[in-house]
Amino acid sequence: MHELSVAAYLLEAVSEQARQNGAQRVTAINLVVGERAGIVAESLRFAFDLLAADGVAAGAALNLRQTPMCFHCDACAADYTPAEAVFNCPRCGQYGRVVDDGSALLIESLEVQS
Amino acid sequence: MSVRVLHVQENLLASNDVVAARNRRRFDQAGLLAVNLIASPGAGKTSLITATLRALAGWASVAVIEGDIAGSVDAERAQAAGAAAAVQINTGGGCHLEAHMVERALDGLDLAALNLVFIENVGNLVCPNHWVLGEHLKVCVASTAEGHDKPAKYPEVFAQSDAVVLNKIDLLELTGFERGVFYSDLRALNRRAPVFELSCRTGQGLAIWLDWLLKHFAPEARVGQSSAAGAGQPG
């Protein structure tokens, strides 16, 4: 529900990276987005295309790599990805502890032309 | 024309983080504590603030930054409850506060005269988590009336909070709220955050929340409080 704000920050960060690296054009943006970060990929692409207009990142492909929420079960000494809103270990039923809360919002890399 | 890959590995909201760090420096220079309150609409953020203001009257100078989509009702409530100052931010439809909004609000406050600033975020359990504001403490307010499934449905805010307030505890019997489920899910996400079961309406449990809050005040304030408390101790 906040994709437009996120897209505005993304464009700012990407434009700054392009400027610092002397890039003429950004052709692809590779993002890491946690599955619980509340980002709808299509909404983000729509907002980004709108804002990027005819600037340095116009037409750039937005590639999202989704990372899952992850817990660790001490009893089983194993990590697990919870199903929806059930946080118990699927193997033994105990409650684990969160390792990754699935909130990542990261610019991993850019593909640019210069 | 050459094609290159730039390895960035940067938080997407890095420019917000820069402004948040500036806010944090201003809070630290003023020696005050800044608390970011996050909750769904109706959980009791404003009630927690006004109950805290009333309890701290004469003890601490508290300002409130109110984030709302529209209107200034909450700022008026904070002022009526004894806030030294209340600044209303209207996001105009935006679902969260951002660091630059808080930065502008700080320009309207005499920070050096304050001990505590509450930042009441827009009522929302999702979006506010991504935008740090420069706060020292992030506090999530849940309530029994909302149900026990909030940590399971909105894990991020519970995982990242420094404390959780469980408000409307006086309604516990009426709501079917299951403590066991709430705490199991919460502890899977966050083992360190204390939980304060309280009622802003009746005042039940409020003292323990206040004790915790007072422990996080600036060192100067802590010195003042401990000597004041010490003066009242026998021997």
Image (cartoon, coloured by chain):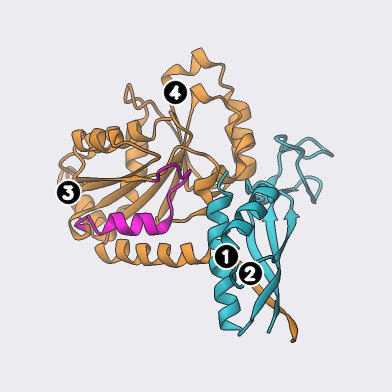
Chain colours: A cyan, B orange
Q: Which mark is residue A11?
A: 1
Q: Is residue B8 above or below residue A70?
A: below
Q: Residue furthest front?
A: A54
Quadrant housing the C terminus of chain A? bottom right
Amino acid type, callout 3: Ala
Mark 1 or 4: in front is 1
Instruction: Decide if residue A96 is on the left or right side of residue B168.
Output: right
Q: Residue furthest right?
A: A91
Name the residue that disc number 3 marks: B228
Name the residue that disc number 2 marks: A57
Amino acid type, callout 2: Ala
Name the residue that disc number 4 marks: B169
Amino acid type, callout 1: Leu
Name the element at disc 1. helix
Does residue B152 show up?
A: yes
Q: CA distance from mark 1 to mark 4?
A: 44 Å
> Are discs 3 and 4 located on one and the same chain?
yes
Write the start and end of the magenta stretch as one range: B91-110
Q: Chain of mark 3?
A: B
Pointer 3 or 4: first along the chain:
4
**Dominant secondary structure of the residues highlighted in magenta in the image:** loop
Look at 22% across and 55% down and name the residue there: B109
Pointer 1 with pointer 2, Cβ within 8 A = yes
Q: Is residue B89 above or below residue B208?
A: below
Q: Chain of mark 2?
A: A
Look at 25% across and 33% down and name the residue there: B77
Instruction: Decide if residue A10 is on the left or right side of residue B81.
Output: right
